[in-house]
Amino acid sequence: MRPTVTEQLSGIRKILERLVAPEVTDEYVAAQLQTVLGALDGLAARWRTVLPALIIDIGELETLLHEALPQLRGDATGGPGSEESELAEGIERSLGAPAVPPSSFDEVHERHVELRALLVRLIRFLDSSAGDEASNALRGQIRAHLRASMDRLP
């Protein structure tokens, strides 16, 4: 179908650059417009990779969270209702949810946001727990995942 998403983004950029930019006289507004133009360039270059990257990220997040469960269950000294227990239950609920259709960007994005929120909670838990070998290993896995995720996602 024409125009493609890339063509649409490029067309919008050209309109802004050729018609709007010459009319902008305020320095601050001109700088903001340049930021928008750069963002459009980035979107045009990478929009096709976002959905596959999110799907890869979701798989890695699910693996990380699954691997954290034994540690959370082992540290659940507070019993039912404790922070560790509630986090473990949230992870188990999330991992037990039906898979999202890989063709639905909104559902994939929502799933990614859900798993990232659980990862943030896990990081906070690890930061407040003792620096034992298992916690340190999990922290290393999380750091590696976050580095890879930053490279993968726009």
Image (tube, grey):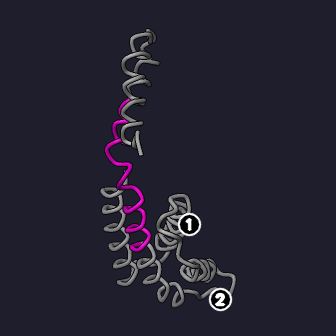
Query: Residue flagged by tag 2: what amino acid is it?
Result: Gly
In terms of secondary structure, where does tag 2 sit?
A: loop
Work out how far the residue at label 1 is from the one at label 2, CA to CA, in angstroms.
Answer: 24 Å
Q: Which residues are magenta?
A: 37-60
The residue that label 2 is drawn on is 79
- What kind of secondary structure does the magenta stretch mostly adopt? helix
Task: Count numbered badges in the picture.
Answer: 2
Q: Is residue 111 magenta?
A: no
The residue drawn where x is 44% and y is 16% is 20
Percent from the top left, x then y, of residue 125? 52, 73
Q: Give the quadrant of residue 92.
A: bottom right
Q: Position of residue 94 (x, y in %)?
A: 57, 77
* Amino acid at the residue labelled 1: Glu
Q: Which residue is mark 1?
A: 114
Q: Residue at x 58, y 87 (%)?
A: 76
Q: Position of residue 3 (x, y in %)?
A: 40, 39
Task: List the single residue furthest toward the right.
Answer: 81
Q: Can you see residue 39?
A: no
Q: Position of residue 151 (x, y in %)?
A: 30, 56
* Position of 107 relative to 48 (above/below): below
Q: Residue at x 35, y 55 (%)?
A: 49
**For residue 4, above or below residue 15:** below
Task: Compare residues 122 and 57 and report the one nearer the observer.
Answer: 57
Say few, some or many: other residues with alpha carbon within 10 Å of mark 1 (under 14 / 14 to 19 / 20 or more). Answer: some
Residue 4 seen in render: yes
